[in-house]
Image (cartoon, rainbow, N blue to C red):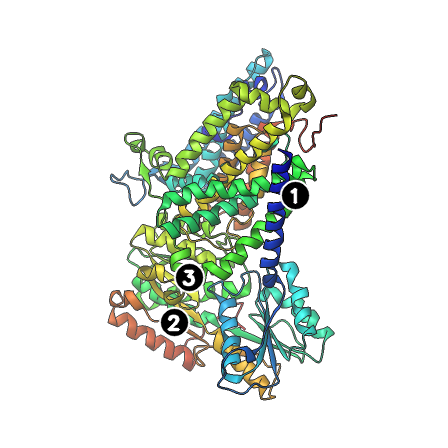
């Protein structure tokens, strides 16, 4: 017995140790130099770094998109890179500090939630430059905000959803009530309202009240089952198009929609048709937020010595935001609706339709 | 909803603190105050119009037309039922007799229905969906709380429920995806929970490390290990590693045809049925068997148990592993139970809420079930009423889960007492 328990402890202790070793790279910033891979471009003396929020770089959403931008820069510009993944809010400050200590020329911090930590680091290190996605509250010469007027693309999605719906009820919900999330919901609601105005229809939106700025939230970006549950409640209430703005939690809603059978799903951030092929048959479209190209552009500018703290704002006009193709459901969207969407897109770009949101950058 | 708050009648003899003590005036007074509140606010001050409860879901074979009731009148009637129950409870208290358990349950149901009729005046609410969501949210909590009961009844605090749930969710998804067989996941999930529990047992029982510290460390460990494997393995080849088949819904003949409650309770997947079985078996085993008596003796007074020949630490060890298996099985609900792929930290703190449900349920399996259902109902109520978009300010709606909890704790639960030897290490001296 004694020997057996000792052996058990030894095994578990070594398992712990192994696990600790194994998990380490996730928390510790990992340095990957461009030299390791076969490069067609010359290496240059520029180090681009990235810090994620809790979602991690494999969230199939905005962290991943930002990271892909950095990887693109590594491949095509030949810069050095480093990345740090955060698993909790308490990781933000140490992760950014470690990037600064590694002499990063440009550190991209992904997400509104990192605004506080980024601002402090930028103030403490005026020589380093930063770019922050989804926030423009920091007004410092060495911080470049990368923001997206996703309300414009979500407006199109709302119009599409209203036109596509047969029950006359569509729905949206968010992960947390923060501006980069609610801006999607604002645009979506306005898009539906525009449809109602033009067509004299009465399509209702569940889950978000733009005037009161209140609605349905799961409270985090992790609880996938909560997303499924909320989506089921929407489906019970008659919704047949659902747009969750909740990162991975949206997957739960997609699952609920798939199970219901006749409910369509609108993804956000990236094209869910590519990132979640298991739900391909119900994905109507996605509201694209082109973070990868934006991160790449900002790095490219910085490499060329043109860093500025002027905000990069992604719009329909500069293709920073867009509506994804309809893929499998293409045949279910009427030609009339498609042409109307194109027309509205042109009107938004021309400024004839102004999509307003409290969260507009 | 009678199961939600039904206090355990006669549970005092079973070790849990019983319903109301004979002659206590607290419960009747609480009922009377709440009944008056319902009468005035929900009834007399309510909006005119009708409240509609739709009771069949879109997938039902036969559709029942939604039930529309005049809001104000219904609320007044229900409030009067509440007041009647308060009078009955007062009468029993005056006679010095115990208030039967069904009084609290019926009171809670009538009060909640009065609230609902008031809240959805002029609107329609999917009533079946409300109950379905309640059960959906409650299932992992029930398993987690049962795991906690198993451990704490022998005196080991199980903070690692969260980790056991997450490990179960992870291994269920991986095993089901790799084998292509959902039942492989169902078997793998308890194993994952047992592995986490084994660490807990070895460190706390054999090596006397502080139970809370080990539990917290294990939670962090599981988050780290599953997160790491998720990033390095599951996302790289998602189609073979992380696309588990989901458990099919099984409709139980006859029972599933009962209006309203049938589809909610008896058109579920295997994990939910296992949950019913687990609660019943655990409740009987803990309070009506020799095994249960020994388990509780170890948790209340280990030295006394030892002197009568019960192997204290062996009993603890076995129960902690059993608790781990239960929580692991509950974890499977997140992935194969809900038909979802595994996601990082997808249990999102449910393990901690399960701990609260265990305490709220006074360390008894059926109490845990009631508490978990109440938490689930409060949360689902917030979601459903948020969707209906009633005239009530959304800020007030957000308060409902907390109001319900406070009401239940203050009015229906009373004093709770953990097993006496909870959290202590036992060594022969």
Between residues B300 and B400, which one lies in front from this camera angle? Answer: B300
| Number of disc labels | 3
The image quarter containing residue B224 is bottom right
Quarter of the image for the C terminus of chain A: give it.
bottom right
Q: Is residue B309 above or below residue A235?
A: above
Element carrying mark 3: loop
Q: Which of the two discs, 1 and 3, labels the residue nearer the N terminus? A: 1
Residue A339 place in picture, x, y as percent: 29, 75
Residue A355 place in picture, x, y as percent: 45, 72
Same subunit: marks 2 and 1: no
Residue visible at 61% across and 88% down in the picture: A305
Between residues A221 and B162, which one lies in front from this camera angle? Answer: B162
Give the Cα separation between the discs numbered 1 and 3: 33 Å
Q: Is residue B107 above or below residue A107?
A: above
Instruction: Check the residue under mark 3 and report the chain it is in.
Output: B
Residue B195 place in picture, x, y as percent: 54, 42
């Amino acid at each position: 017995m004694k020997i057996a328990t000792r052996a058990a402890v030894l095994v578990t202790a070594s398992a712990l140790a192994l696990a600790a070793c194994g998990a380490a790279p996730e928390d510790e910033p990992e340095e990957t130099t461009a030299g390791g891979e076969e490069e067609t471009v010359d290496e240059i003396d520029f180090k681009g770094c990235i810090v994620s929020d809790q979602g991690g770089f494999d969230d199939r959403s905005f962290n991943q998109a930002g990271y892909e931008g950095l990887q693109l820069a590594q491949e095509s510009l030949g810069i050095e890179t480093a990345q740090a993944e955060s698993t909790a809010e308490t990781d933000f400050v140490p992760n950014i500090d470690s990037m600064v200590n590694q002499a990063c020329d440009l550190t991209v911090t992904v997400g509104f939630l990192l605004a506080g930590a980024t601002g402090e680091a930028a103030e403490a290190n005026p020589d380093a430059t930063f770019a922050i996605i989804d926030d423009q509250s920091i007004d410092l010469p060495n911080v470049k905000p990368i923001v997206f007027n996703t309300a414009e693309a979500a407006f199109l999605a709302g119009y599409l959803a209203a036109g596509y719906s047969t029950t006359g009820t569509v729905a949206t919900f968010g992960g947390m009530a923060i501006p980069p999330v609610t801006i999607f919901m604002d645009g979506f609601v306005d898009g539906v309202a525009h449809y109602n105005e033009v067509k004299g229809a009465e399509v209702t939106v569940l889950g978000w009240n733009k005037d009161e700025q209140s609605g349905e939230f799961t409270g985090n970006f992790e609880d996938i089952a909560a997303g499924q549950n909320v989506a089921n409640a929407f489906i019970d209430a008659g919704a047949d198009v659902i747009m969750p703005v909740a990162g991975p939690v949206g997957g739960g809603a997609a699952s609920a929609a798939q199970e219901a059978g006749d409910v369509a799903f609108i993804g956000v951030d990236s094209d869910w048709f590519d990132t979640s092929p298991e739900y391909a048959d119900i994905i109507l479209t996605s509201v694209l937020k082109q973070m990868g190209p934006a991160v790449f552009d900002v790095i490219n500018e910085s490499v060329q010595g043109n860093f500025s703290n002027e905000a990069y704002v992604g719009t329909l006009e500069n293709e920073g935001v867009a509506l994804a193709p309809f893929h499998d459901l293409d045949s279910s969207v009427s030609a009339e609706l498609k042409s109307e969407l194109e027309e509205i897109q042109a009107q938004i770009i021309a400024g004839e339709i102004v999509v307003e949101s409290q969260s507009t950058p | 909803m009678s199961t939600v708050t039904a206090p355990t009648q006669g549970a005092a003899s079973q070790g849990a603190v019983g319903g109301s003590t004979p002659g206590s005036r607290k419960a009747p007074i609480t009922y009377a105050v709440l009944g008056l509140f319902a009468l005035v606010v929900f009834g007399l001050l309510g909006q005119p119009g009708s409240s509609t409860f739709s009771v069949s879901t879109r997938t039902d074979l036969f559709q029942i037309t939604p039930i529309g009731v005049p809001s104000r009148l219904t609320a007044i009637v229900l409030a009067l039922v509440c007041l009647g129950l308060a009078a009955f409870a007062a009468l029993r208290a005056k006679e010095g007799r115990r208030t039967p358990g069904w009084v609290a349950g019926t009171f809670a149901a009538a009060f909640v229905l009065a609230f609902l009729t008031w809240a959805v005046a002029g609107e329609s609410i999917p009533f079946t969906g409300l109950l379905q969501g309640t059960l959906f949210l409650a299932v992992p909590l029930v398993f987690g709380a049962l795991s906690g009961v198993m451990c704490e009844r022998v005196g080991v605090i199980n903070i690692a429920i969260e980790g056991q749930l997450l490990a179960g969710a992870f291994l269920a998804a991986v095993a089901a995806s790799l084998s292509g067989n959902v039942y492989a996941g169902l078997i793998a999930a308890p194993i994952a929970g047992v592995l986490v529990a084994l660490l807990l047992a070895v460190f706390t029982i054999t090596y006397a490390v502080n139970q809370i510290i080990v539990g917290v460390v294990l939670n962090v460990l599981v988050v780290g290990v599953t997160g790491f494997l998720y990033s390095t393995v599951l996302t790289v080849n998602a189609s073979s590693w992380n696309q588990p088949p989901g458990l099919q819904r099984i409709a139980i003949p006859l029972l599933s045809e009962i209006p309203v409650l049938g589809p909610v309770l008896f058109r579920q997947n295997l994990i939910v049925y296992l949950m019913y079985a687990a609660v019943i078996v655990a409740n009987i085993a803990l309070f009506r068997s020799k095994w249960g008596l020994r388990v509780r003796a170890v948790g209340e007074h280990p030295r006394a148990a030892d002197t009568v020949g019960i192997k204290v630490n062996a009993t603890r060890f076995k129960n902690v592993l059993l608790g781990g298996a239960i929580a692991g099985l509950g974890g499977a609900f997140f992935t194969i139970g809900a038909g979802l792929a595994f996601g990082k930290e997808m249990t999102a703190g449910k393990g901690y809420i399960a701990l609260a449900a265990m305490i709220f349920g006074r360390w008894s399996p059926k109490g845990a079930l009631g508490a978990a259902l109440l938490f689930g109902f409060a949360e689902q109520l917030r979601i459903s009423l948020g969707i209906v978009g009633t005239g009530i300010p959304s800020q007030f709606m957000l308060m409902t889960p907390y109001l319900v909890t406070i009401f239940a704790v203050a009015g229906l639960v009373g004093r709770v007492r953990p097993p006496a030897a909870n959290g202590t290490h036992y060594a022969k001296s």
